[in-house]
């Protein structure tokens, strides 16, 4: 009789997006003439940069010819892509990495989820709250989270609330935590950490032998010089941090699937006999056992964004989304609303007015302004009282949405 | 202090292919003028079918235009591909499946490895021996395998030897086993199970409440009408079996990455309180938490092989490899060698002559015939005394290799 991993049954249903869809459907039924504007969308809308399209066509052609056909690639990724990443995203910021420290994959969701596989279930976990739900769920699956309480918090997880009250700066735990997830620029709040603020986390990790799992999927949106793009800009971070990166939001790869994880040789984990082992070796073994590399065509597409022309095209796309964010921030502030994030990040975190709950304000915005957001409470208990808006939409939608909001909220 | 999953440290190094590479290098150093023929290669050599190339070009173009751009796809895969799979690979064989029972992924290695995630570590596991090493390693990682003995067998795994002595028919265990892996057509032996033989396994599974994890990655090589392509051709198999399929060896997708897993709604797992839960729901939750779908471009490429023209092109490629297999079988038999498999399968399992070990015969073949195989002992203890050859090479290489072997072995 095959027994299942019962931790799966502890996971609460993830109803957030289906609940949103249901609300929208019932609104549309009653108001079929209204054009709704969706600012809740977490997906990009701009097509792939031309350089990627060209590179992928070329790669497809190579695959059609026996002389240039590529079968199984190197499991860790092709050197051409790994070298381009190291040169452009790390060396350029004073960070030296070896080829064997980069692992190309099909997505950061896979990587952040699967990384738990090489870690013992006996670790304590710390999370900023609100947070990308995958971090929580993958730890629940492994039996690392404990039990969920009435307040929506898991018993074995240390929550670090990020709210307007603490300026969205997670407080460093007063006790030792084995593994800490940090995501900056942050999803969902759109806030960032300065170099000095991130250094405090690295110092904590080094002092407490904590492993930091650092998600910098949105680093391309950083324009401010004092915001670090990679955690390895902080001295000695290689000893305590693993970094997750993605091409999804930089180059429109959400449907193409490419990401990478940096596991420095210096970062290690502990064994029960107090000896240490290289996490790079374990992750390499995990990936070579349960993964068989990323599409060659995809990797050629990803490589193209590091060409001079590719950089220009990516910059233009990111600029477009950042300008959307600016328009949305300004528009909502004009309307008397309070917003956070949206600078150096594609996410805007809107405080619900008059103490409304996230869901109440979601409904209010839908019915009054015909604008769709994402209730912040879906990202964790401390997301209550906020709404997430994203800058990934079309410019005219952002402008029109702000007009609608101004009309409804201006006093 | 982050503790690691110590099961990883139990895994023996996987030196098979690096050892082979080393032997070849040292041979080449001494004999630089010799052209070696590699029949050990597990990768395809034929380029992608034209229909796939065309479909992927079209998909890349779609991604370059905002109106047709696709971001995140449905996590379980696009309906166009799922429907094509159901219609062509299942309905055509009298098997009805619902869309929600097919999960598109980036590869069978990922799927067979990750499937363990939804199963308790407390299950007993049964494996045919020799076997694809991923099945063993992923269970070791989960702590399901116990400890490795001097004979290379893990203490908590039931081995079902497949050797010439039992005609490569694994004996059904006399005791209850919770999870059994079967791969037919088999890698590495190239042997198959008839419908009647597979039915015995399904009957065993139904009687013992065993979960069968059925890998049919090589089903496209089946030409014999009495060999089932899918385990669901056997009555009631939907109650006890999950099936893994891949586009790698059918359409040259080893570097493109596409596969799928069938998890019928009827197959369930047990909870410690003796209640049951749907494995489909758990796998769906696993994939939606730790995976974000397969490239749209890849899925369009995969869809194309189900068109009438695509079927013709795939058939031609498979025919080519099968003819290679026939040439190799005949050639080696002419040379007085004993071979198995290679009919309805791309793998040939060569018995080493005069009781030589796999490695000794590997070296002998390298030095005498300048032909490279893969030592069977690398696939498990019962692979000792065999060599795996594959039909994925070039025709002229297969012919030339057989001439060399005949010259050396003919009495």
Image: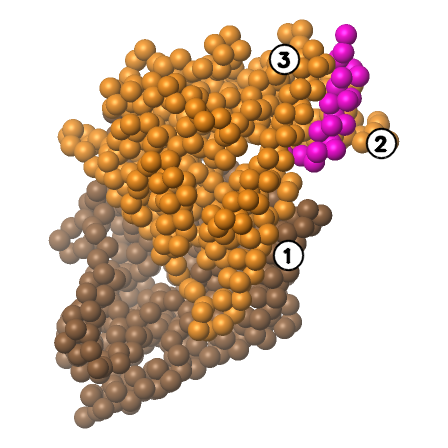
Chain colours: A brown, B orange
Q: Is residue A121 visible?
A: no
Pointer 1 local density, CA inside 10 Å: few below 14, some 14–19, many at least 20: many
- Using the rendered image, report if marks 1 and 3 lie on a common chain: no
Secondary structure beneath disc 1? helix
In the rendered picture of this protein, how many numbered marks are placed on residues? 3
Position in image of residue B215 (x %, y %)? 43, 32
As displayed, is residue A230 above or below residue B35? below
User: According to the image, label 2 marks what residue?
Assistant: B32
For residue B21: magenta? no
Q: Is residue A102 left or right of residue B215?
A: right
Could you tell me which quadrant the N terminus of chain A lies in? Answer: top left
What chain is tagged by disc 1?
Answer: A
User: According to the image, label 1 marks what residue?
Assistant: A61
CA gap between label 1 and label 3 equals 41 Å
Which quadrant of the structure image shows residue A8? top left
What chain is tagged by disc 2?
Answer: B
Looking at marks 2 and 3 on the same chain, the residue that comes earlier in the sequence is marked by 2
Task: State the residue at coordinates (33%, 53%).
Answer: A134
User: According to the image, label 3 marks what residue?
Assistant: B338
Task: State the residue at coordinates (39%, 59%).
Answer: B73
Magenta: main secondary structure = helix
Pointer 3 local density, CA inside 10 Å: few below 14, some 14–19, many at least 20: some
Secondary structure beneath disc 2? loop
What segment carries the magenta color?
Answer: B391-411
Secondary structure beneath disc 3? strand
CA gap between label 2 and label 3 equals 31 Å
Position in image of residue A16 (x %, y %)? 23, 61
Q: Is residue B96 visible?
A: yes
Task: State the residue at coordinates (40%, 61%).
Answer: B72
Return the residue nearer the eye: B370 or A346.
Answer: B370
Q: Is residue A278 left or right of residue B385?
A: left
């Amino acid at each position: 009789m095959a027994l299942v991993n019962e931790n799966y049954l502890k996971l609460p249903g993830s109803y957030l997006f289906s609940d949103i869809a249901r609300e929208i459907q019932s609104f549309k039924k009653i108001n079929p003439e209204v054009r709704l504007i969706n600012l809740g969308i977490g997906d990009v809308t701009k097509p792939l940069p031309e350089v990627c399209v060209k590179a992928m066509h070329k790669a497809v052609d190579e695959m059609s010819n026996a002389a240039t056909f590529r079968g199984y690639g190197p499991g860790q990724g092709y050197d051409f892509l790994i070298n381009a990443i190291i040169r452009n995203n790390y060396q350029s910021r004073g960070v030296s990495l070896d080829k064997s420290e980069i692992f190309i994959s099909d997505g950061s969701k896979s990587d952040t989820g699967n990384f738990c596989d090489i870690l013992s279930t006996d670790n304590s976990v710390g999370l900023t709250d609100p947070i990308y739900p995958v971090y929580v769920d993958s730890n629940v699956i492994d039996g690392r989270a404990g039990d969920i309480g009435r307040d929506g918090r898991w018993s074995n997880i240390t929550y670090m609330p990020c709210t307007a009250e603490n300026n969205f700066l997670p407080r460093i735990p007063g006790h030792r935590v084995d593994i800490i997830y940090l995501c900056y620029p942050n999803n969902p709040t759109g806030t960032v950490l300065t170099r000095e603020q991130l250094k405090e986390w690295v110092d904590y990790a080094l002092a407490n032998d904590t492993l930091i799992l650092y998600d910098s999927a949105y680093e391309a949106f950083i324009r401010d010089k004092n915001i670090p793009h990679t955690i390895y800009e902080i001295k000695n971070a290689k000893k305590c941090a693993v970094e997750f990166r993605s091409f999804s939001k930089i180059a429109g790869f959400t449907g193409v699937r490419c990401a990478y994880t940096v596991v420095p040789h210096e970062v290690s984990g502990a064994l029960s006999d107090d000896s240490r082992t290289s996490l790079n070796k374990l992750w390499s073994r995990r990936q070579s056992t349960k993964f068989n590399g990323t599409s060659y065509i995809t990797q050629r597409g990803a490589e193209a964004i590091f060409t001079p022309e590719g950089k220009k095209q990516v910059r233009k796309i990111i600029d477009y989304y950042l300008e959307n964010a600016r328009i949305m921030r300004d528009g909502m502030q004009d309307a008397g609303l309070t917003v956070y994030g949206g600078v150096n990040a594609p996410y805007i975190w809107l405080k619900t007015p008059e103490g409304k709950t996230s869901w109440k304000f979601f409904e209010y915005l839908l019915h009054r302004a015909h604008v769709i957001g994402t209730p912040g409470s879906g990202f964790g208990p401390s997301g209550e009282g906020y709404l997430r808006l994203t800058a990934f939409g079309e410019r005219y939608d952002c402008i029109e949405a702000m007009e609608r909001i101004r009309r409804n909220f201006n006093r």
